[in-house]
Image: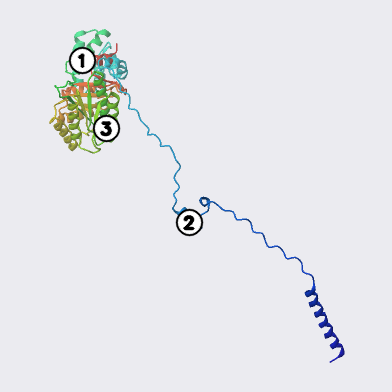
Amino acid sequence: MEPIGIIAIAVAILVLAAGSMFLLLRPRGKAAPPPVEPPEVRIPEETQAPPRGAVEDQEATTTIPPPRTTPAEPMVVPPPAVEIPPPSAGRMVRLRARLARSQNTLGKGLLDLLSRDRLDDDTWDEIEETLITADVGIAPTQAMVQDLRTQVKVLGSRTPDEVRALLRKELLIQIGADLDRTLHVQPHGERPAVVLVVGVNGTGKTTTTGKLARSLVGDGRSVVLGAADTFRAAAADQLQTWGDRVGAEVVRGPEGGDPASVAFDAVAKGTADKADVVIVDTAGRLHTKTGLMDELGKVKRVIEKKATVDEVLLVLDATTGQNGMRQAQVFAEVVDVTGIALTKLDGTAKGGIIISVQRELGVPVKLVGLGEGPDDLAPFDPEVFVDALLGD
């Protein structure tokens, strides 16, 4: 081996040995103190958190109660105040001005024509046309014209007052001032009077029933209403409103139920309550429906098992003209109409239908509707009617 290599190895061994001795012989420092643990804090048992599983179970099974609220009090709807209607006497006089305005064409037109100095054939044709236009009817018109021509010849020259008196007399004859227009609503001992109201849809039948009840209550009579129009839910509700306003009991049935059954129950209720009058509102029958008309006859027969039908009032719309007269004929054949209630007379110049209906049927007009107000149904007074037509 080379001397230089031996020397290098020796130097390396000496360096390593010196480093080891230095490490073994260097002074040691103080050991680091152990970490200080914080003092133990004891938590009361009631505040200690439950184990994790218990918390999850509790959250899964606990129901949070809803917030406490004060229950809302139910809304109490006070019953409608019972009204005290005015009596029926004098109603037509009070409504005379309204009637005069609506019938001005008939009355004033005839007066103007008859007041002409010379009444030739053309004038009489105009008079005849005026009467027909007012729905007096062909036969009554011809009779009136014939009578007027005869009396004009007898009078010769005519003053306005004489013409008015002449026309007034003739109209009263044609209207039938001597017909009995009494509404038979007197109770029979412990049994009430029964009024059956019939008519075609749209004539104001249910409204007329309610107004009639109101009128009778105003005259001091107790009334029970029978809502036998079971095919039109609004009819029963409408009648209920009329009854509530005047304190009249209303007997109803299920929608689409048997009208005869409702009518029978209404009469039974009126008898049990010792009411003066029972008014039965029937379904609006189309006069062309034979089956429905037969059912109306059934209603009347069922009522008669419990009581007598004192009045059968046919409600007619004054604006329907001669069609209304044909309806009256069909109804009269089914239920023996005893009187007519003519509605919407205030809005038409066709009041001559009073003459034509009475002449064809021999049935008097007993009630007239002269407006839309609750007290605008009035007993028909021929003299007041004619005076309203002719004016003062």
Marks 1/2 in contact by CB < 8 Å: the verdict is: no
Tag 3 secondary structure: helix
Residue 151 relative to residue 242: left or right: left
Residue 236, numbered label: 3
Q: Quadrant location of the N terminus?
A: bottom right
Cα–Cα span, label 1 and label 2: 103 Å
Name the kind of residue labelled 1 in the image: Leu
Residue 54, numbered label: 2
Question: Label 2: how many residues lie within 10 Å, few (<14), some (14-19) or many (20+)?
Answer: few
Tag 1 secondary structure: helix
Most foreground residue, 308 or 197: 308
Mark 3 or mark 1, which has the lower sequence index? 1
User: Disc 1 vs disc 2: which is toward the camera?
Assistant: 2
Question: Label 1: how many residues lie within 10 Å, few (<14), some (14-19) or many (20+)?
Answer: some
Most foreground residue, 82 or 118: 82
| Quadrant in the rendering for residue 34 | bottom right
Mark 1 or mark 2, which has the lower sequence index? 2
Percent position of residue 56, x then y = 48, 56
Q: Residue at x 84, y 85 (%)?
A: 8
User: Disc 3 vs disc 2: which is toward the camera?
Assistant: 2
Name the kind of residue labelled 2 in the image: Ala
Name the kind of residue labelled 3 in the image: Ala
Q: Residue at x 44, y 53 (%)?
A: 61
Q: Residue at x 48, y 56 (%)?
A: 54
Percent position of residue 198, x then y = 21, 29
Mark 3 or mark 2, which has the lower sequence index? 2
The answer, for residue 384, to whether it is visible in the render is: yes
